[in-house]
Image: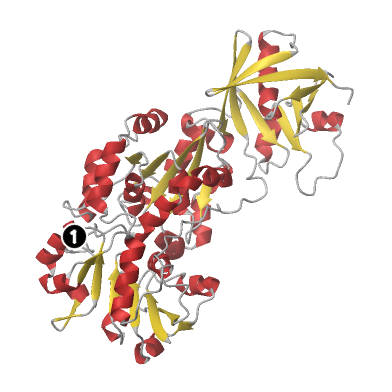
Amino acid sequence: MHRILVAAHSVTALTRLADVLTVVENDPRLETAFTHIPGSSFGEGVADFLGALGTRTLAWPQATREGFDLAVAAGHSGELHRIGAPLILLPHGIGYNKYRRGGEAVYGLAPDQLLRQGRVVPAAVVLSHDEQLRRLKASCPQAVPVAAVAGDMCLDRMTAALPWRGRFRDRLGVARGQRLVVVSSTWGPASVLADRPDLPARLLAELPADEYRVAAVVHPNLWHGHGAWQVRAWLADARRAGLLLIPPREGWRAAVVAADCVVGDHGSVGLYAAALGRPVALAAYGRAEIDPASPMAELARTVPHFDHDAALRPQVEAAIAVHDPARSERLADLAVAERGQAARLLRALMYQLMKLPEPVGPARTVPVPPAEPEPVAWGYDAPAMVVTAGVRGDAVRVERFPAAVAELRGRALSGPHLVVDDTETDQRLRETAEVLVRRSDAPGQTSPLVPDEVFAAYPVCRIIVEMPSGRLWLRDGRRLVARVPEPDVAASAVLAWLDHEGALPERLTLELGSRRVTVRFQPSAL
């Protein structure tokens, strides 16, 4: 039995290492143990992650005493020279882009990270592109003989998942005709959430809810450095407004696959998105942290940068409109060589160092799994909406924006009108809503609807709409059924039409962004 040691100092590194292990996971000749490298300031969460994986985990002192045939690590933290096995060092992002704190050396290419008493520690330093050989030669020429250009397993797994893009969007709740905007934040003072903490909420406030969904990808160092509760608390208003919060261990890659636009910073997510062909805009950028010779710097030179004093919706739409697939291809070529070949190259390298014949058959690239957003709490799953509804001929154009962030776009809660679910936890919103939504199919919903009691409890309410049946109760006593998949939107159209025309026709045309939907009304005896 040949033994492999996986050494991780952070959740980010562990995710990268789990990618690499997919190329050896089906070999019964191998046994894998894991260890947590001590001393990293980003070590929170590693033990929990290893426990969730069900790994055999060794304490660091034991791991450095035992013999192994191969060791793999992502990142260069800790006393890796103590590992008694040929060591493969992988980048823990897309190549080598960032300077180390307080220095000019690029993290992962610095001599003190690769040498011990003049001796090269790793048996192999994995590079994602040939251009990194030049920078490695300038920084630590002694390590050039052990450098191996092997592409990027993470990008290959994302690329392999592209045929599932539609399924990934379905799992995230992105409807046909909607655009998905993914906000990505790395860690540190120049990151999106440090520099522009209100960005997710502002996007939700300015992008019509029927035309856009917004997701947030937050670096694991923030999740574990500040605690999951704190991250959720910082984003509480945005989550009440419908933000899809992606968990730290897995999901960000599927969210990028599903995205129509990625708004990021100098973290790896934006460069991965560009390499995958997604439109990218930067909302923050830590220029001083990035090597100007790196692909990350080239990304910053070629994609739009947000003007935070201007409206965001036109900038999102412009980033999508000006996106050039050929430019994305050039960025991908700069960032990752041997695309699609990482599984083959890494497997060959691992078995070579173990002095073991490779398994029969090609190395397999496993697509990334779909994203599962953080579960939402009671009252978060049906955001209250500020609705603008205007009559245009025989149609009503409706735009909806989440009420939880309405103040960010200068829109008062009293106008034009509010649509609120009856599970809304904010009493102020329930009491000022003109449309109240009741979901008869909600879990635990057994009590009958008594319209007179609802109208008495909420004097501002003018229409009660039951989902999904489409039954409408008007305060003036009329009872209708709206034949449409979105009865709550139809109720807003009814309000606008009654205020404009008075009498309600048998059918109306709803305009929701680029969609046009015909609504048919029938009298109801209930």
**Location of residue 347 (image quadrant):** bottom left
Left or right: where 238 falls relative to 104: right
Tell me which residue sits at (12%, 74%) in the image: 142
Q: Nearer the viewer, residue 355 or 206?
A: 355
Tell me which residue sits at (44%, 44%) in the image: 182
The three-letter code of the residue at mark 1 reads Gln
Secondary structure at numbered mark 1 = helix
Left or right: where 167 falls relative to 92: right
Question: Residue at the front extreme?
Answer: 360
Q: Quadrant of the N terminus?
A: bottom left
Q: Nearer the viewer, residue 507 or 383?
A: 507
Q: Which x, y percent locates residue 369?
A: 51, 56
**Location of residue 72 (image quadrant):** bottom left
Q: Quadrant of the C terminus?
A: top right
- Regarding residue 198, the answer to whether it shows in the image is no
**Location of residue 353 (image quadrant):** bottom left
Tell me which residue sits at (29%, 41%) in the image: 328
The image shows residue 138, relative to residue 430, as above or below, that is below
Q: Which x, y percent locates residue 287?
A: 22, 49
Q: Which x, y percent locates residue 55?
A: 50, 77
Q: Dot 1, crowdedness within 10 Å: few (<14), some or many (≥20)? A: many
Tell me which residue sits at (80%, 45%) in the image: 445
Question: Residue at the bottom extreme?
Answer: 65
What residue sits right under mark 1 in the picture?
132
- Regarding residue 236, the answer to whether it shows in the image is yes
Left or right: where 20 falls relative to 513: left
